[in-house]
Image (cartoon, rainbow, N blue to C red):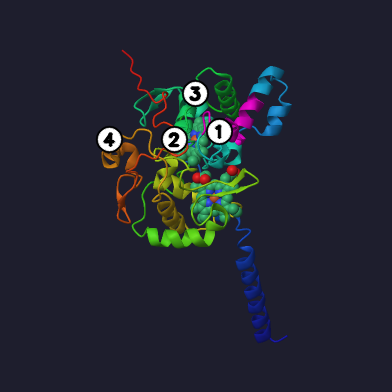
Amino acid sequence: MTTLSKITFGMAALFTASFSVAVIGAQSKAPEEIKLPTPKPGQYEHKAPTLADIQNDKDLHPELRKVILKGRDLFMNTQQLRGEYVFNDMNCKSCHMGEGRMAWSGPIWPAATTLPDFRGKNGHVNSLEERIAGCFSFSMNGTPPAYGSDTMLALSAYHQYMAKGAKMYDKNIAGRGFGHLGKDIPEATTYANGEKVYQANCAICHGSDGAGKKFAGEIVYPPLWGDGSYNWGAGMTRIFTAASFIQNNMPLGQPGRLTDQEAWDVALFINSQERPQDPRYTGDAKETREKFMNFHNATVYGTEVNGKILGQHDNTGEKPFLKPEALKPRTFK
Ligand code: HEC
Ligand code: HEC
């Protein structure tokens, strides 16, 4: 082989390789291509226990093991509470990836080690149960199980066991929440490009109408907007939260396939679609936006998109009421 043909051959191989990557690209892009931040100095990482750990932990009283496993079951299949506490198509695990264990994908255990604490979202000190109640009220478009109930006990036990071995009251946690892309929406972010990214990468599972897909009555692909989705008060409506979640996890099984900019664009696109009302609604979306600006500064709720004010409606989805009892203020004298 001459040098030239070696080069040509090399190039052909390279071409074939990159071609097959482009095709398999639909399957796999090495997870290390996602630029997840390394822990900052002073931050600590925690590996939450797995299902096998729960099953094999000899220190667990059999009754406690049962309760933790029940909590895990409720977390994975929250639809069993449909119509009572859950009024959309979500399960807790739909957003808290890896059974609620995955760093940068909303690991749940930090709630068990940092609460009770003051929360800006509702302006008072919250317990672990109240934090769980928050996701019921907004992300599940529902209402929380009563504090102290069997369901709440099981869910809290699962959260708390996930924190086994983690530091108590130390907020220097690496990989908490979903924010690896940061909070600043790049100026180049557009709805139009988000729509293109959506139709090319997401519609196949989540549907071109964003309603998700069911097979034999089971929700296989959860909705991204509309009545079956999270409501206007949910953390996922914040563009930076959705962008990080999506870049890290979607399309499912192909994390990192989207560029950072594509993730921002598609996050803006899905969160510019209608969804059930924010339970804190005052009757006027612009006013509600102003009132809860520390939250809505990162959403497009109450702003005009395609000639309409987002969230200016009385639709609460399947939920027959607007505001759950649990969202009441708490003050200490
Ligand atoms: C639609 C997506 C979504 C669903 C469904 C959802 N959550 Fe969340 N959850 C979030 C977001 C977003 C946050 C805020 C994370 C952040 O601060 O960036 C969050 C935060 C939490 C936290 C606090 C974690 C911490 O770091 O302190 C807990 C606990 C939690 N959720 C539990 C649940 C439970 C239990 C359910 C089911 C009943 C649930 N979530 C359903 C999106 C969701
Ligand atoms: C192969 C199917 C598939 C594709 C393609 C896909 N998703 Fe998902 N998505 C899922 C599944 C399944 C879940 C729930 C995860 C779970 O339960 O483990 C999910 C969850 C989500 C969630 C959180 C839950 C919810 O419904 O709000 C968002 C947001 C999301 N996907 C956005 C996207 C975006 C944006 C794209 C395109 C870039 C995309 N997904 C592509 C299957 C897919």
When asked about the image quadrant of residue 16, the answer is bottom right
Q: Is residue 209 magenta?
A: no
First along the sequence among labels 1 and 4:
1
Name the spot of residue 100 as percent of width and height, x first: 57, 36
Q: Is residue 300 above or below residue 127?
A: below
Task: Find the distance from the CA under tag 2 to the CA under tag 4.
Answer: 17 Å
First along the sequence among labels 3 and 1:
1
Q: To which residue does mark 2 refer?
A: 138
The amino acid sitting under disc 1 is Arg
Any part of residue 31 in sight: no
First along the sequence among labels 2 and 1:
1
Query: What numbered label is drawn on residue 82?
Result: 1
**Quadrant including the C terminus:** top left
**Residue at left 64%, top 73%?**
14
Name the spot of residue 61 as percent of width and height, x first: 70, 17
When asked about the image quadrant of residue 159, the answer is top right
First along the sequence among labels 2 and 4:
2
Task: Find the distance from the CA under tag 3 to the CA under tag 1.
Answer: 19 Å
216 horizontally vs 44: left or right: right
Any part of residue 85 in sight: yes
What is the secondary structure assignment of the residue under circle 1? loop
**Residue in front for this viewpoint, 43 or 60:** 60
What is the secondary structure assignment of the residue under circle 3? helix
The amino acid sitting under disc 2 is Phe
Name the spot of residue 7 as percent of width and height, x first: 64, 81
Q: To which residue does mark 4 refer?
A: 291
Badge 2 crowding class, 10 Å Cα cut-off, few under 14, some 14 to 19, many 20 or more, is many
What is the secondary structure assignment of the residue under circle 4? helix
